[in-house]
Amino acid sequence: MSDEQAPTGVEPDSSPADVASAMPTVGSVDDVPQSEPSVKATPPTWSEPGHTPTRSASEVPTAPTWSEPGQPPVSQVAEVMPANGFAPTAPLFASPAPSPASSPAPSPAPRRLGTVVVVALVSGLLGGGIGAQFFRDSGSSLNPDTVLNNVGGDSASRPAASVAGVARRILPTVVSVETNSADGSGNGSGAVIQSSSSQSYILTNNHVVLDVVTSGGAISVRLQSGDRYSATVVGRDPSYDLAVLRVNKGGLPVIPMGDSTKVVVGDGVIAIGSPLGLTGTVTSGIVSALRRPVTTNPSNSADETSFISAIQTDAAINPGNSGGPLVDASGRMIGVNSAIATLGQEITGQSGNIGVGFAIPINQARRVAQQIIRTGGSTFPVIGVQLDRMYTGDGARIAMVEQSGPARSAGLRVGDVITRVDGRLMADATDVITTIRSYAPGDAISITVQRGNSERTVTLTLGSRPSL
């Protein structure tokens, strides 16, 4: 099967119904296992005095989510911002809509951060006024001779290994990515990964810049200093939800990169970015889990589906953090913040960070970014099979083996059930796909399959396919 053909399993003239029933190919951009249905919801909009949402709820494109048994849906971190660049629309979230017969009375629209900040400030002012009035009315409680002690010490001194020390070093390498397109305005984050005397390259998420790529518009990058520069898309890789931008500004500080294969659960991490447009925001937490299978599709297009074997963290990640770095306790970038899990408005009346965020491991992101900077494009690994979307057992059943591909060369057959990849148990087709995507084309891996009553393990070398 050649790279120039239509997405695997879909004939060039297929109708939408044909596309929906087509079986996915492991490692291709149109993998949509049946066990991972797409759930969509249209987000509400909100406003505060003096602010008008950029889009109405009916104008905002729906966003896909993913789920596994017992796991909440996941929504994109990228957030649409009004043209004034301050008040964000509500984040994308999803949960099953109640039926009319059982629908509860509508609840008020959830309060967003901007509204909460305003309420908090007003409450503080009211509290101060009441307190001042109380003391004025209670003159006998005043003591004009009171002097409060001044706490000594250098409050600006922080150990280099502390969160404050890491933030001080890494913040200058993090930028805010602002977009304006026919679909509206948006914001995300990014990190400077290479800089010469005249230009710099910035790593971010594909879904941060997708509206501009598909609808036209402009992208700008804002540094921590507040300086803003026009940016262009060098290339993007929807299969990993990554994009590289270039600005004609040299001499920028570059973020140091770590090794995501050395990360373990419990490691301290720091997320830096522009959640809700609040630039230079720093949050901290730990690595909660590794190799979480996460799929996203910001445009409901098979060509834009990403499959990520993600780092899970409880460091606060919110809309606008997309593309920003997740760094370890030494300040080395170990991931690209990309998605968050939400419970959905119908369940809690809230959305945004619930302590379950996901980042693309930096080893994957570094390989893709290097390819894009060198060639303008990138590739992802394949084994050359289609998986049975209707299979409900453990693992993933092979529905088709390409005529010339790694799987056929290794002796895999239709009906084989992939149970392990490099010794790791596979839960389903999505687990198989995201695990294979965590490697690079040309890597040798072992695949264990169940064939009838027997089990066999083969070693194969991963093939390659262009992301776009």
Image (cartoon, rainbow, N blue to C red):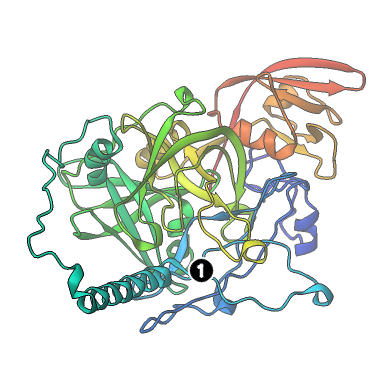
- Picture residue at 16% right of the left edge, 68% below the top: 142
User: How many numbered markers are drawn?
Assistant: 1
Q: Does residue 185 appear in this view?
A: no
Q: Nearer the viewer, residue 140 or 106?
A: 140
Residue carrying label 1 = 90
Q: Is residue 7 above or below residue 132?
A: above
Q: Position of residue 456 (x, y in %)?
A: 80, 15
Q: Element type at marker 1?
A: loop
Of all residues, the one furthest to the right in this rendering is 453
How packed mark 1 is, by other alpha carbons closer than 10 Å (few <14, some 14-19, many 20 or more), is many
Q: Nearer the viewer, residue 143 or 117?
A: 143
Q: Is residue 34 above or below residue 461?
A: below
Amino acid type of the residue that numbered disc 1 sits on in the rendered structure: Ala
Q: Is residue 440 above or below residue 118?
A: above
Of all residues, the one furthest to the bottom in this rendering is 50
Q: Position of residue 230 (x, y in %)?
A: 26, 61
Q: Quadrant of residue 225?
A: bottom left
Name the side, left or right, on which 374 lies relative to 159: right
Q: Nearer the viewer, residue 423 or 457?
A: 423
The quarter of the picture where the N terminus appears is top right
- Picture residue at 13% right of the left edge, 64% below the top: 143
- Picture residue at 20% right of the left edge, 68% below the top: 141
- Picture residue at 44% right of the left edge, 28% below the top: 267
